Image: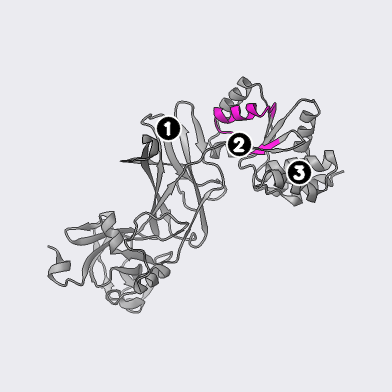
Amino acid sequence: MDRTREEDPQQDVVNFQIEYLTQFGQSVMIMGDIGELGHWKHLLCEMEWHEGNIWKATVDVSSRVFCYKYVVVDQSDTIIRWEEGYNRICDLDIADKQGLCQDGEYQFEDKWGRFEMVFKLIHPLSDDMNRILRVSEPNATSYQWNEMKKPVEMHCTGKERLFAGSDKIKAYQGYSLIKQKRIYCQPINYMYSLHYLKENITVFERDPNRVMIIQNPDEYSAKAIRGLLKTPKNLWQTSEQVFIINGYLFKKDHNFVDEFKIDEIEGYNIFVGPHPQQKHDIKVLAKHGITDVLCLQTKDDFIWKEVNFYKLNEYYQENEIRLTHNPITDFDEEDLKVKLRAASGIVSNILEKGNSKIYVHCTAGMTRSTSTIITYLCLYHGFSIGSACELVKYHHPISSPSKAAISAAVKQD
């Protein structure tokens, strides 16, 4: 029965559900910023326990947008625990788009202190099952959101859109269950990748990484009260500033770019850029006349970026390019200080052969590779650190060298 219309046309029926294991004498309640949920001051909405530690409550609400949170209380109705993280946003207009309204009542099955992120990427992908689209964090040093600690496979929604040239553009979605704590108002970095099953090679989109910042839900609620939310509301959010709504964050992106771009430090036969990922990238190096490659990535980099080092080495040999591997740990300035001098010496030895061109790379082509080149210019061409940094930055704008590590390496004489 549609209680929202037969009992009060101004109210909607919302069924809340959450799993939580309580101790003896404890129960779960809901508080929120609307009168039906006590205006954050009163405990008005007690939930009922069901088998499997499932707590349920049905509330008739008069507002289409409100904030709420689960709390645990003792027998005297004293709050002993608040759900971690920001308050939850309930937006019934968005819930309609999610299909959360069944038989005239809204169904919310929440997870304590958690929410789900759903990524959608509009990207042309053939029906060839050899390629898998995935989403992941760009760095393995700290996991902000990806509890799986590996790329999350995305699945085609089955919908297609036709663009110029009659290319079929398919929407792919990926899901990941996220903890709420400690990620609000911080940049959350992520990136997409294509994994080729037969070749066992993964191609990541090029840096910079994609970024989103989860906003305070109170701002969403305030905008709703003032009528400032966009109409009609969009389920999929496309800007960097995003909200968690109805327990979900729906993020939509476009333009997977895997173009391999390299920069030349003109006059020195040195090239710099990101790490090669596929056969095409090696051919780009060959077209530039590069004879040698200095790879500064570590085994951990290979694992996280799913680099098939042996396959890439085969591609280098096919194109008559010599590969030298001299690993330096990323985000480790002490390791960089110790190894920069030797790395710059490798560059010098290769270029002294004559008719040689070298490509120096780490992962993104920002710190380890540029620091190596700058150290080489200082030690073997008499540059000051400042002038060498300016030269490399001029030719390679994303350069972000460690001046402290370079200074330590240069002063080892």
Packing grade of label 2 (10 A; few <14, some 14-19, many >=20) is many
Residue that appears at 59% across and 33% down: 276
Between marks 2 and 1, how big is the CA–CA gap? Answer: 20 Å
Q: Quadrant of the N terminus?
A: bottom left
Find out whether residue 246 is within the magenta segment.
no
Between marks 3 and 2, how big is the CA–CA gap? Answer: 18 Å
For label 1, the SS is strand
- The amino acid type of the residue labelled 2 equals His
Return the x and y of residue 31 as percentages of the image width and height: 33, 72
Find out whether residue 282 is within the magenta segment.
yes
Residue that appears at 82% across and 43% down: 378
Left/right placement of residue 387 relative to residue 37 reads right
Q: Which residue is mark 2?
A: 275
Left/right placement of residue 19 relative to residue 285 reads left
Q: Which residues are magenta?
A: 271-292
Q: Which residue is mark 3?
A: 374
Q: Which residue is mark 1?
A: 131
Q: Quadrant of the C terminus?
A: top right
